[in-house]
Image: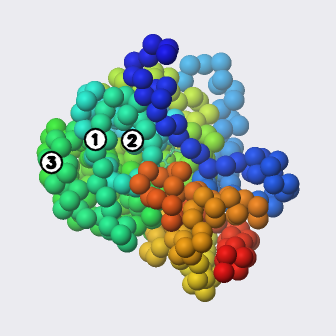
Amino acid sequence: MTYVSNDVLITGEPYTPGLSRGYVAQHFGFDPSQIAKLGSAENPFGPSPKAMVAVAGAFAELDLYPSWTAEKLRVKIAEKYGYQPEQVICGTGETEVIACVIRAFAKPGDNIVMYKPCFPIYHIFAENEGRVPVYVDMGPGFEFHIDKYIETMKSSKARIAFLTNPHSPSGQLMSEADIRRVCEAAGNDTLVVLDEAYIHFTETEGGMPLVRDYSNLIVLRTFSKAFGLAGLRAGFGISSAERIVPLLNIKPTWNMGCAQTAGAAAALDDDDHVNRTVQMIVEMRGYVAQRMSSLKAFRMVPNSRSNFFLIEILSPKLDSTKTFEELLKFGVIVKDGSVSFKGLGKRYLRSDVSLKQHMDRLVDALIEIERRAA
Ligand SMILES: Cc1ncc(COP(=O)(O)O)c(C=O)c1O
């Protein structure tokens, strides 16, 4: 075997992304524009128009090294949320900030606590870096069981504690009181990571103000979801200035290019795009819930506050992989829970909330799959 820092880099599980339109068009004979792409929680309205203009404007600077801290974006984020630029770290997507957090705040062999199921990048990156994921099971209705979480965090002496709000893949919203309890129990030697990738869709302010109260908290956000910039790769974290220093030192020096910095900074001002997106998602979340309520073989797991939801498979004749594959034949891409989320098992799919025509295509396909399995 090739000599590597950790054999898991060769033998470990890779990340499984949602399928692309091109793949499904090629294998199932659809026009790509007809495919309902509901597996990656992207913005169906496309990129922020203000970001597109700014990215085009940045091309004239392609010959120059960018600011290594993405200063322009850092300052803009700090102003928007009422913090100092020294409290902000920018990354090529939230995913890069997560990788830096794991390397900076846990040593090899240290424990990192997270819910099961969760965003798989937490445990994949932890294992790749020789850190040890410790899991806390959610309840049968995807309850957070915060006492159990805190007890596990403390008994395992976890150095990092991941929370996702709203939670992925269930979309459940954790209360501010629970987040405060975790920060208070964590102490100075454990960093609480509050991943708010989907916070816009909850129509709440989220946990950003808590950074003022807890120096052991970092709040992470992305430009990939409500801003529609998944292809640009930009995300950030806000924490106490002392927690940002190690992150700046461990990140690849010029991680943010000029196009990312300019596009993300412009998107922060694009309230029209964000508001229009959130309004549509909230409306369609209600619409698809109402349409799903007539199904017998499938059930929407209630109370998602995100731009996706879980579909529980009730029919004993079906499982998640079978249903996922059947949906592809209807030109509908979702996520097979058993492949995409460790510990979720064979009874769940995750689908995005999207435009009405895509929601109709999903529900119509489920109706047909239900009829055939009856
Ligand atoms: C919970 C969660 N956090 C972070 C991310 C990644 O965001 P980014 O595209 O900024 O790397 C995702 C992406 O799907 C996610 O589901």
The location of residue 29, given as percent across then percent down, is 85, 54
SS at mark 2? helix
The location of residue 361, given as percent across then percent down, is 73, 71
Q: Write down the residue under mark 3.
A: 154
Tell me the kind of residue under disc 1.
Answer: Ile
Residue 135 in view of the camera: yes
SS at mark 3? helix
Query: Residue extending furthest top?
Result: 3
Is residue 373 shown above or below 30? below
The crowding category of the residue bearing disc 2, from other C-alpha atoms within 10 Å (few below 14, some 14 to 19, many at least 20), is many
Which of pointers 2 and 1 lies earlier in the amino acid sequence? 1
Q: How many marks?
A: 3
Determine the residue positioned at 81% across, 54% down.
28
Tell me the kind of residue under disc 3.
Answer: Lys
Left or right of 300 in this view: 276: right
Tell me the kind of residue under disc 2.
Answer: His
In contact (CB < 8 Å): disc 3 and disc 2: no
Label 3 and label 2: CA atoms lie apart by 19 Å
Left or right of 68 in this view: 189: left
The disc at residue 123 is 2
Label 3 and label 1: CA atoms lie apart by 11 Å
